[in-house]
Image (spheres, rainbow, N blue to C red):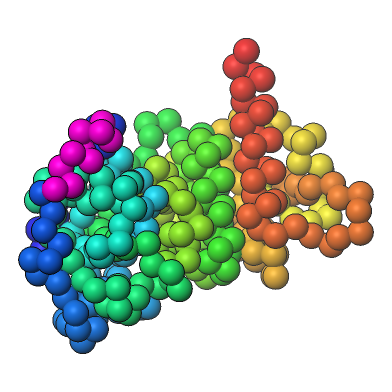
Amino acid sequence: MRETVAVSGAFCANMVEVERMTAALDYNKLVITSTKNSKIKALRALQNQAKERKKSASFVIEGVRLAEEAVAADWPVRSGIYTEALSARGQAILNQLIQAGANLEAVSAQVMKAASDTQTPQGILLELDAQELALVEAVDFVLIADEVRDPGNLGSLLRSAAAAGVDAVLLSPGCADAFSPKVLRSGMGAHFQIAMRKLRWDEIGVFSREHRLEVLLAAAGEGRAYDQEDLSKPLAIILGGEAQGAGEEARALAGDILHIPMPGKMESLNAATAGSLFLFEALRQRKAKAK
């Protein structure tokens, strides 16, 4: 495995000090100008193919915001590329990575666009080690994603789960790849804050029993209203994709079924919106109970 560098988030705090080191960069020293460069091809393959991410045990993030989140989380950086047209925030993060010894190379704007998964690259792209965050000692608040296939929805769900303080997100078979570019962008750094596990349904059942979680299922128009249920107890909430709803395995595992009352004429909410409502209602109840 290639060498990785973990950059301390504490070093990120003093932006003024970091920006003073910008002069240390010599962009013109070595610049990759060919889109056929082996490193660029490898980065693009990681962006495009889940099998390549699995094979290399790494994934790619783009943009200053995600780079900042990775640094703040001390996430191991394997390699990266950058362009001259970085913002001041981007230069600050770049300097931190270089000072820590990260393997970064300057590239032309054309090469960055070839490696990027976005139409307007922000000038920094990093390859990071794939790793699982450790579970908290007492797991009592879990989200189970049931075949959430849309990358944007899954990323938004992860973002809401991290914001609500969920202990873990379990990804069932059929979910989008959590480390695909669109999920990472939609997650806005949630990947660096929340424990995720990709499990089979039998493993999800074992996990729930081991942690003594009551499993509840969110389903449009079925069961009780979600705000009438005690969500302050140790629980796992199953949320399915909006197109197909809950699968057979999810229904077999769940106890009670809950829905979000909708007095309007819409049939359902998208998975990210519905998940946010469930998670923050659970958070509200837990805070009220703790008073």
The residue nearer to you, when weighing 251 against 143, is 143
Residue at the limit of the structure toward the top, as seen here = 291
Instruction: State which region is magenta.
Output: 14-23
In this view of the protein, can residue 26 be seen by the observer? yes
Q: Position of residue 209 (x, y in %)?
A: 50, 43
Q: Which quadrant holds residue 82? A: bottom left
Q: Closer to the camera, 237 or 166?
A: 166
* Residue 128 in the figure: left or right of residue 188: left
**Can residue 202 be seen in this snapshot?**
no
Asked if residue 171 lies in the magenta stretch, the reply is no
**Number of residue marks:** 0
Residue drawn at point x = 25 percent, y = 65 percent: 83
Residue at point 45% right, 73% down?
119
User: Residue 95, percent across and down?
Assistant: 18, 47
| Quadrant of the rendering where the N terminus is positioned | bottom left
Q: Which residue shows up at 8% across the image and 66% down it?
A: 29
> Of helix, strand and loop, which mostly describes the magenta segment?
helix
Q: Is residue 22 magenta?
A: yes
Q: In the picture shown, does residue 20 fall above or below 222?
A: above
Eyeballing the image, is 115 above or below 135? below
Quadrant placement of the C terminus: top right
Task: Pick the residue in front: 169 or 223.
Answer: 169
